[in-house]
Amino acid sequence: MIACCARRTYAGTTIADVVSEAAVSRSTFYKLFGDKRECFDAAATLCIDRIAETVAAAASGCDSPAEATRHGVAAMLKLLAAEPGLVLVLSGDVVGVDPGLVGRYAASTIPALEGIWEREGVPPPKHLSPGLAFGRAQLLIFHEVAAGRSERLPSLLPDVIYLALAPFAGHDEAVRQALVASGGAAT
């Protein structure tokens, strides 16, 4: 389903496309899923889970919330560059099929960031919205993938780091970590 949606969109994908791509019979498909939408929901959940697991693994064991965020974002961008279909499903098709799934994706991301910072005693942001930052980062990533430039996703690291850190650490620390992420000297 992910590969088919990435090539044809959800609306343009048929069950015949999915079973052909998966090299399974139609009866096998119907043993697993009631219909195309159920298969899509499972695919979207898989995309969300893959990203969350990748970020969590990269962020574990870091010395600071800023470092954990930087490592998690870098791993996420590397994953999405290698598997741009994840982006197309979560940022493209999900919006048209079930906008509630976008909320679920955000709900798996924003609370994870908040948790990293809360463990360090940093209160939730009062003036900047992590949701706004998440949406902007999602748009930057989707734009590159939709334009056929998924290999450029790692170059977005400084921008996405800034967006992820600014609500929690403030402008100065977000800029410092963006510089570190870009290979520049942090002052």
Image (tube, grey):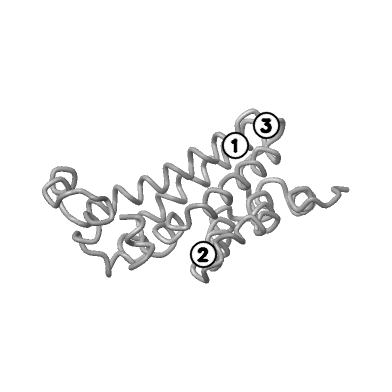
**Element type at marker 2?**
helix
Q: In the image, which is nearer the foreground, mark 3 or mark 1?
A: 1
Three-letter code for the amino acid on which mark 3 is drawn: Cys
Residue 128 location, quadrant: bottom right
Three-letter code for the amino acid on which mark 1 is drawn: Ala
At 42% from the left and 42% from the top, the residue drawn is 49
Circle number at residue 58? 1
At 27% from the left and 51% from the top, the residue drawn is 22
Three-letter code for the amino acid on which mark 2 is drawn: Val
Instruction: State the image coordinates of residue 106 (x, y, percent, origin top left).
Output: 47, 51
Q: Is residue 62 left or right of residue 55?
A: right
Circle number at residue 151? none
**Element type at marker 3?**
loop
Quadrant for the N terminus in the image = bottom left
- Mark closest to the chain's N terminus, 3 or 2: 3
Q: Residues within 10 Å of mark 3 (few under 14, many from 20)?
A: some
Residue 101 location, quadrant: bottom left
Depth order, front residue of 122/76: 76
At 30% from the left and 63% from the top, the residue drawn is 97
What residue is shown with label 2?
145
Residue furthest to the left:
27
Q: Residues within 10 Å of mark 1 (few under 14, many from 20)?
A: some
Depth order, front residue of 87/14: 14
Instruction: State the image coordinates of residue 55 (x, y, percent, origin top left).
Output: 55, 41
Q: CA distance from mark 3 to mark 1?
A: 8 Å
